[in-house]
Image: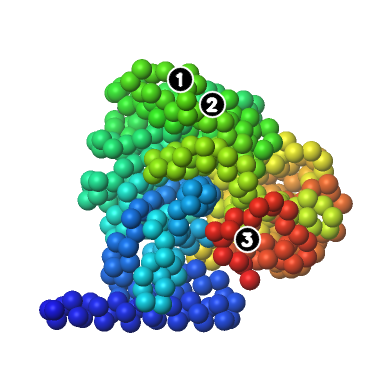
Amino acid sequence: MNKNSINKGFRFWLAFYAGRLTAFICRLFRLSGTSLPGAVALRICPQLLFYLAPAYEKVIAVTGTNGKTTTTNLISYFLRQAGVPVIGNGEGANMINGVVTALIKDCNFFGAAQSRTAVLEVDEGSVGKILPAVKPDLIVVTNYFRDQLDRYSELDHIIALLRKTIDHLPETELLLNADDPLAVAVGRGRTAVRYYGVAGERDCKELEENEIREGGFCPDCGELLTYDYYQYCQLGDYRCTKCSFKRPEPDFLALDVDDSDLLHFSLYLQNKNTGEQEPQKGNLDLHSQLRGFYNVYNILAASAAAMLIGVPQQIIERSLPDYSTATGRLEQFIYQGRPCTLGLIKNPIGVNEVIKTILPQEGKKAFLIAINDLAGDGKDVSWLWDADFEKLDQSMVSKVVCSGRRAAEIAVRLKYAGFTASKIVLEPGCRESLDVLGLQKADQYYILASYTSLFNYAKLLRKRGKAVAKNADQSLPSLS
Ligand SMILES: [Zn+2]
């Protein structure tokens, strides 16, 4: 044995046990501990992920701006339903510390991995650190929207980073969102690329006005793309009039989408050679408890990924109706005897899609919007000004409680959106704001929260009210 490998081994074990000890202490003090064990272990052995990852026969990585957590959790769920032991960082701790934490926790005391497959959510700014170590068999890209500006300077930079990273991973297959020209740009020049997309125009009247379209330029020549239709934001059926760039034909196509309440659509596996779309053996009829048009993309991506790694189609079709949402992805509670929906918001596109999902629901509504500006939320909250809060200013919305560290900024934003002062309540405290919400005489409560406040509200709602999810996702660690 040469000295180098002894040295490596020692560092590995020291880091591994330091990580496990940290995880134990976190549990003892009831801290969430989804990142700290990894942070401690990586301090001791920065190469730790290179040692942990090869234990897995299959690695799937999910990256992009929105929908990562739902897609990751759903892929893991399908794999479990197929009887495959799987590990993932399903709570959204998607930087290298979170990934390392998840893999350390998956090992037994002697350092042997318990699962055979890893499904990892990877922050778009962390792909350069994580992907070379885990060497994914499959990378799923959801979409690229403008996100937290302090962390992700430019979309171009993010996409270039992923392209540069996968240049060194020639074996990796890509599964890209065909409807997003920015996601499609990731796979240019590669052969092992599959696409998923939604067919046909979305039936949504509010779509055309005030939509944010930030990626609508040709990634090859820079020309403004021409669209036949949009789904939302820059997602749709596009082509360049100056060069050959256009929306690729999806291998996995969602058709007949019904998003009026719980989602329902058909998934067609297209034969690209014949271009046929007719239903054939193996096409799926998908029913989900999830709401919101954007979730069609998440379900579609997760189903396609699961099929690509060998999950039988019948298992996907049969198990999807029982899958309920991860924390804060429009999770349903009962609070003060009323339905209360908790949603994560972190960027303008996300807010707009959540608002579009919520507004058609019946009855008088009271909102609580809680925005923090800690590292996990993104310190720059200027995106609040790009989100379409104007749409919330309607008679059916009786009150908006503004909370979190940036409560005052939301209140100002709502005033500019046209809200009268009497509809706005300023209450920065988490418990106090929930108290105020509970006094509102509405038919439905909605809480929209940024990442770090989300879990506090989820915890309080579980304590004071009750969760109504039928079949909570077992992959999620308890929040206690
Ligand atoms: Zn072009």
For the residue marked with disc 2, what is the amino acid?
Answer: Leu
Q: Looking at the image, what colour scheme do you see? A: rainbow
* Mark 3, secondary structure of its residue: helix
Residue ID for mark 1:
277
**Farthest front residue in view:** 83
Residue in the foreground of this view, choosing between 263 and 231: 263
Residue 230 spot, x, y in % from top left: 51, 28
Tags 2 and 1 in contact by the CB under 8 Å rule? Answer: yes
* Mark 1, secondary structure of its residue: loop
Tags 3 and 1 in contact by the CB under 8 Å rule? Answer: no
Q: Is mark 3 within 8 Å of ligand 1?
A: no
* Mark 2, secondary structure of its residue: strand
Of the two numbered discs 2 and 3 on the same chain, state the one appearing first in sequence.
2
Residue ID for mark 3:
454
Q: Residue at x 59, y 55 (%)?
A: 473
**Farthest left residue in view:** 2
For the residue marked with disc 3, what is the amino acid?
Answer: Leu
Q: Residues within 10 Å of mark 2 (few under 14, many from 20)?
A: some
Residue 72 spot, x, y in % from top left: 48, 51
For the residue marked with disc 1, what is the amino acid?
Answer: Gln
Residue ID for mark 2:
255
Which mark is drawn over residue 291? none
* Residue 135 drawn above or below residue 459: above
Residue 419 in view of the camera: yes
Q: Residue at x 45, y 20 (%)?
A: 277
Residue in the foreground of this view, choosing between 260 and 83: 83
* Residue 71 drawn above or below residue 19: above
* Residue 124 drawn above or below residue 187: below
Q: Quadrant of residue 182?
A: top left
